[in-house]
Image (cartoon, helix red, strand yellow):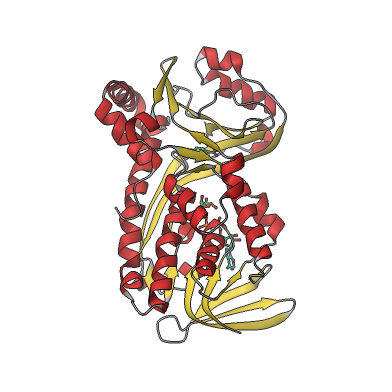
Amino acid sequence: MRTQVAIIGAGPAGLLLGALLHKYGVDHVILERQTPDYVLGRIRAGVLEQVAVDLLDEAGVGARMHREGLPHDGFSLAFDGGHHRIDLHGLTGKRVMVYGQTELTRDLMDARRAAGLQTVYSAENVSLSGFDGERPTVHYRHDGQDHEIQADFIAGCDGFHGAARASVPPSAIQNYEKVYPFGWLGVLADVPPVHHELIYANHPRGFALCSMRSKTRVRYYVQCSLDDHVEDWSDERFFAELKRRLPEADAARLVEGPSIEKSIAPLRSFVAEPMRFGRLFLAGDAAHIVPPTGAKGLNLAASDVGLLGRALAEHYRGSDAGIDTYSQRALSRVWKAERFSWWFTSLMHRFPETGEFGRKMQQAELDYLVKSEAAMRSMAENYVGLSLDT
Ligand code: APR
Ligand code: PHB
C-alpha cells in the first residue's frame, strides 16, 4: 500500500491529525495496535484549551463538543479550609471547555468512519524503517498476514510506549525525565458535581481534585502512594478521604455514588528532543508526558498535530518551512506546558521528602498567588493555554 502520511496510533493525536490532513486534502492511513473499544475505554483528562477547541472546529468535529461540553470561566484553589477562585475569563478573556477525552475520541472516530477514511485496528508488530532516507516504510501484521505501507512521511502518534520513538537510534534522541513520588487515584461516578467549577485542593493529607465530565458525571482524584492498590480503595474509603481534603462546606455538599471506573495513575514529566527524525515526526504522548495537574496532556497532543498537519499540507503546496521548523516550534510550547504542569504539581501535592519547610513554601506561594493579580493572571494565562506559536 502507498500513502502520503502513515500515522501510527489512533489516540487523540493520531485521530485529530488524520481529521486535519483529510481537510487539507492529504492522503493518509492510521495504524492502531488496539481495538476501537479498548481505545474508548481509557479514561483520561477532559479540559480543552481554546487552541484545541479551534483545531477540533477546523477539523469539522466540534459540533457535539459545543452542544454538550461545559465552558468554564474559572476554577477554585482550596487550601487552609477556604476557596479561592481563579477567574480565567476575567484575567485572560479566555475560557476552557470541559469535555471528556473519551467523547472527543468517539467524535473523531465517528467522523472518520463517516468520511470513509482508513484505520487499521488490531495492527500487530508495527515497525518503521527508511525514515532517515527518502522511502519511509511501516511494516505490520494484521489478520495473520504481513503488510507494508510506503509513505512520504510517518507520524508517530503512538503514545509513550509506542514503536515510533523506540525506533530512533538512542544517539539521535535526548530524553528528559522526572518521576514524582506519588500517584493519582481517580474515580468516575454518575452523581452531580460538588461545585459548578473544578476544585484543586492542597491539604496536609495530600492533593485532591474535583473535576467533572458533565452535569451528571464526576471525575474525582486523591493523591495516593505509589504502593497503593486500587483493590484496597473501596468507594467508601475513597469518598471519606476526598471529603477530608476539601473545605468543610464542599465536603458537606458532596454527593457520593458507586464508582464506574477507578484507577491509579503515576505522575511523570518527560520530553524527548527533537520531535523530527528525517521523515518521521513525533506528536503527543509519543514525544512528551506531563503530570495531569492542569490537564495539559491532551492539549499538547492537539497543538502538536495542529502544527504538524499544517506543515505537511504546506509541504504538498511546495514549502518545507513548516516541516523544517516543526520540532523547534512544537518543543517551545511543550516546554512551557511542562514547566506549568511541574509548577502546579509542586504547588499542590504533599511531597514526603520536602517536609515541613516544603509545606511552608507552598503555603506562602498559595497565599501570594491569591493576593496578587499578576500571579493569578500568570497562572490563568498558562491554564487557558498559550497560543500555538509561543
Ligand atoms: N502500534 C500501533 N499503535 C500503537 C502502538 C504500536 N506499536 N503503540 C501504541 N499505540 C497506540 C495506543 O494503543 C494508543 O491508542 O497509540 C495510541 C496513543 O494514544 P495516547 O496514548 O492516547 O496518546 P496521544 O494520542 O498522544 O494522546 C495524548 O491523550 O491519551 C491522552 O494522556 C494522554 O492526554 C494525553 C493525550
Ligand atoms: C479530569 O477531569 O480528569 C482532569 C481535570 C483537570 C486536571 C486533571 C484531570 O487538571
Q: Residue at x 48, y 48 (%)?
A: 53
Q: Residue at x 60, y 41 (%)?
A: 67
Q: Is residue 59 above or below residue 182?
A: below
In the picture, measured across the screen, residue 325 lies left or right of residue 39, that is left
The N terminus, quarter of image: bottom right
In the picture, measured across the screen, residue 12 lies left or right of residue 334, that is right
**Position of residue 181 measured from the top left corner of the image (x, y, whole percent):** 45, 40
Q: Nearer the viewer, residue 22 or 367?
A: 22
Q: Residue at x 67, y 23 (%)?
A: 256
Q: Image quarter for residue 373?
A: top left
**Position of residue 302 measured from the top left corner of the image (x, y, whole percent):** 47, 55
**Position of residue 206 measured from the top left corner of the image (x, y, whole percent):** 47, 27
**Position of residue 120 measured from the top left corner of the image (x, y, whole percent):** 66, 71
- The reply to whether residue 3 is visible in this rendering is yes
Q: Residue at x 34, y 65 (%)?
A: 327
In the picture, measured across the screen, residue 386 lies left or right of residue 312, that is left
Q: Is residue 173 above or below residue 206?
A: below
Q: Image quarter for residue 234?
A: top right
